[in-house]
Amino acid sequence: MQLNTRYGQFGGCYAPESLMPILTEIERGFIAIEQDESFQLEFKRLLKDYAGRETPITYIQNLSNKYGANIYLKREDLLHGGAHKTNNTIGQMLLAKYLGKKRVIAETGAGQHGVATAMTGAMLGLQVEIYMGAVDIARQKPNVERMKLFGAKVHSVSSGSATLKDAINDAMRDWITNAEDTYYCFGTAAGPHPFPALVRYFQEIIGKEARAQMLKLTRALPDAVIACVGGGSNAIGIFSGFLSDEKVAIYGAEPAGKGLETGEHAATMNKGEIGVFHGMQSLFLQDKDGQIKEPYSISAGLDYPGIGPEHVYLQESKRVSYLTITDDEAIAAFEELSKKEGIIPAFESAHALALAFQLAQSQLKGKTILVNLSGRGDKDLQSYFRYKGLSDE
Ligand SMILES: *Cc1c(COP(=O)(O)O)cnc(C)c1O
């Protein structure tokens, strides 16, 4: 297998000298497991029997009628754990065991990746420690409780802005000190090589399934595929199934928060500048001195100041268009899917839906659109009622 270390000029491996041997070890492990039949069987077995793959495709009749296009959802919200993240944690943590590691660390922002890592660690018998910003710990209590119930240790990070990027810094520090017995389970298709390629690999199952399912259901490929982009893992997972089908248009939806003009957004693809951070060359939201800016989105899972390098390449090469969706537009889509189809989407996934509804009324009128419903929205109910002013918190 030939591994991509770069996507055009993006990606690479900008890591401290002391981490290079361990990144090389992971790369070698990745190449080995790709050929290892018993690893592949175990990965497939767990995806099926533990996580519940394959996930279905749902045609949403009511909203298709309303918006004038045929809209299908790939239901990653039905995966165990409630989102696509489980594909990645099962894959990487099986790799951790394959490499003989006993301890797994991870960073988390909203807590979704922390919960997926803790959950999978409980199942695979690995010791899990999660780094999380103190501010996020206060905002995301139910996720912190879930991680603890799964037996993980949660480290509160109070340096810097006490959010995701500070948690990543501390997790990196832990890793440098304990690399011998510790595996770092990265949460999205970003970071230093080999993580963007590795996470993509474990998420490709979404695109593989979806392509075959659409061919079976509709006897054709969809005209367009749409996914939300935070770091880019669910998006690259579903996109990978269609990138070589030139006729399939592909769109990413990124968070415009309160509006691009307000500065309160996480629209890295549209507003980011080239830089090096978290081990990769990519686009980042930066101030004029090149310092990383705090991103904002109502959807905590999209609230990352960078983006996986392959997406920057796909934008540059014009294969994928990355458009923006505001908080208000995402919330409207969240309400509509709940009220008209009986499905509560994650706020993240609601960005992809909102973009689908917009395009269904313009360039994709009458077309077949496949949306990746990356996760379920139960976790967002409190934020929803707060946003609507219907909560006393
Ligand atoms: C974490 C998360 C995302 C964003 O992460 P990506 O790596 O961009 O996929 C999107 N949707 C849901 C439901 C999530 O939990």
Image: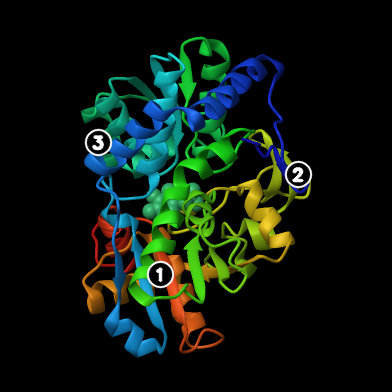
| Front-most of residues 205 and 179 | 205
Residue corresponding to mark 2: 290
Q: Are marks 3 and 1 in contact (CB under 8 Å)?
A: no
- Quarter of the rendering occupied by the C terminus: bottom left
Tell me residue 2's x, y (percent): 66, 36
Question: Residue 265's mark?
Answer: none
**Mark 3 C-beta to ligand 1 under 8 Å:** no
Give residue 318's quadrant in the image. Answer: bottom right
Tell me residue 381's x, y (percent): 26, 59
Regarding mark 2 in the picture, which secondary structure is present there?
loop
Looking at the image, residue 24 lies above or below residue 266: above
* Residue at 23% from the left image edge and 59% from the top image edge: 392
**What is the C-alpha distance between the residues marked 1 and 2?**
46 Å
Residue corresponding to mark 3: 146
Q: Residues within 10 Å of mark 2 (few under 14, many from 20)?
A: few
Q: Earlier in the sequence, mark 3 or mark 2?
A: 3
Q: Are marks 3 and 2 in contact (CB under 8 Å)?
A: no
Marks 3 and 2: which is nearer the front?
3
**What is the C-alpha distance between the residues marked 3 and 1?**
38 Å
* Residue at 38% from the left image edge and 42% from the top image edge: 87
Question: Residue 215's mark?
Answer: 1
* One can see residue 297 in this view: yes
Regarding mark 3 in the picture, which secondary structure is present there?
helix
Q: Residues within 10 Å of mark 3 (few under 14, many from 20)?
A: some
Looking at the image, residue 26 lies above or below residue 321: above
* Residue at 76% from the left image edge and 49% from the top image edge: 8
Tell me residue 250's x, y (percent): 57, 68
| Front-most of residues 61 and 166 | 61
* One can see residue 93 in this view: no
Q: How many marks?
A: 3
Tell me residue 262's x, y (percent): 61, 66
